[in-house]
Amino acid sequence: MYPTPNRKTLILAKVLIVIIILGIQPIVWADSDAKIKTIALPIAEKVSDFENDELIPVEELEKMTYTELEALREPRKLLISYLIKEGKIRESHKGTIDFLDHLNEVGRIAVKEENLTRRQMFTLLSKLEKRSIASIGREFHDKTTSIPEKKEKRPEPVIEIPTSLRVNAPVSLGKTLVPNLVGGYLQSLGYGDVNLERKNGVTRLIGRRSFGSGFLAVDLENRLPGSTVSPKNKCLILDIGESSDAPGTFGVQGIAVVVHPDNPVTTLSISQVADIFSGKIKTWSELKDGGDGDISVILPGTRPVLTSQFREMVMDPYDEKLLVSESTSGDDHLKQIEENPYAIAFCLPGEMKGKLKSIRIKSASDALPLSPSSINLKTLDYPLLRFISVKAHQSTDTFMKEFISYCQSDAGQNAVNKSTGYIAAGASPLIETPDEDNHRRTLLSNPDVPETYKEAIAKADRKNSPSNFRFIPGTSKFELTDHSQASLNALARYLRSSPDHYKNVILIGFADSYGDAEANRIYSGKRADSIAEKLTEKGITNIVTLGIGEEMPVADNDKEEGRAANRRVEVWLER
């Protein structure tokens, strides 16, 4: 008869105490099975036949308290530790133990009883803490297997702080973004009192130390389109470009096309926008659901950088010229939209205040229409966007290098999000996307979105998701771009540190439209599987993958860069 759990615990504890007191070393056998029997001696003395029906009955485990279950595990720990060391078993990410090699019956019984005991402990904790058993198991695994890292002590970088500094940036970045970033960085260095001063045409940030004495003056220089920085001048340069993999990339700037809220038009392709702003399309009736009335094109009069970017993204690809219209200064062009139901203009997404409606933009006739929302900018799907980067010019100062690192840190990314019209483009999933719920509702209500996709995201969200994963063109092993690799690493860190914040990681793969549709669907699934494998290697479990194929393109499949953008993997988290 198998002894009661409490009696068995007492017997095992006594034997171990005797071993410790007498200094007996039971693990001295050359034969592995002999070692296991020796370590499990108390069990072997009381059980003659180690068959499955000799396990402690589950109903007896269910009657025990958490403390009793923990006591039941104690005598077994020596054996479990030995088996792990010998490579016969391993701790799984579920919090239980997996078999790796053949074990005799003594070892098998001990491991199976350990798993039964753990599962009952997880069940009790699940009821007590109102968490899933899976999340408790993952937490148990992390605590059981975590080994304090022996980090090599590296000397902190000596930051030689200058008394003055120059930051050169396009004029469009100088209003809020540059002051927010530079001011936040100065505060991180101990300059608690940071003030913005404008005097004699010079904009300057003055930082004064919270301790001791000293100050730092940072001149903020605005650069007009077409102008360059003197190669002899040492400074930090902020720039706007087309590549997300440019060194020092930390932000995204989008351009929104806006109309009066009563305008019935909701979606335009980029080519249609170009035709409107060039004057080829003159009336709203020429567009689907456009209504009546002549189109009134409004351009910003004193926004040369914004106008230049719009020309590069919208007009130049179609060899179109901007229509000459009456220009206005400052934000007045947006006020005209509020007063004129037939007007159309463009601006930064963060400037859309009052009675304005943004148009959803399609990069091609069959592409998914996308609004200039935070989530569409962060995932890099919205077609009218540019990347903001920073670099040190004519300098290798540690101070400047540390500023670049600050821009890509969580603190720097938050500073970007607080700046009107800009979105953080860093990899950190900790930066939540405020308009994600509306984004999901739009997808669920879109008749062109496949039902399999809707089912996958029905109970999920992208609040903490990084940018979509994209791949280097021409590689057959799903090699990620630098930006996507950084996003993957950051996502894995977040998931490991927050196992209670999600139930499943949903990875949805997409393809371009070249080739057979079914082959593309299969390949898009493999694309998602490749991300799942990379996350699994980093200790992430509960991953679901899905391949959508060539449906839901976000870019033009007739262009190589468009096909590369469509070959992507989305990340959703089911809570």
Image (cartoon, helix red, strand yellow):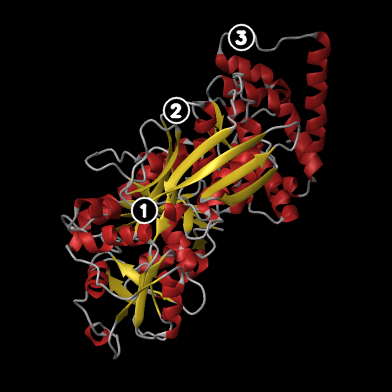
Residue toward you, 303 or 84 = 303
On the image, which quarter does residue 275 sit in? bottom left
**Numbered label attached to residue 29:** 3
Between discs 3 and 1, the one toward the N terminus: 3
Dot 1: element? strand
Q: Which residue is mark 2?
A: 395
- Residues under labels 2 and 1: Cα distance? 26 Å
Q: Nearer the viewer, mark 3 or mark 2?
A: 2
Query: Residue 50, image x and y in percent?
Result: 62, 31
Between discs 3 and 2, the one toward the N terminus: 3
Q: Residues within 10 Å of mark 2 (few under 14, many from 20)?
A: some
Q: Is residue 406 visible?
A: yes
- Residues under labels 3 and 2: Cα distance? 65 Å
Relative height, residue 161 to residue 16 (above, below): below
Q: Residues within 10 Å of mark 1 (few under 14, many from 20)?
A: many
Amino acid type at mark 3: Trp
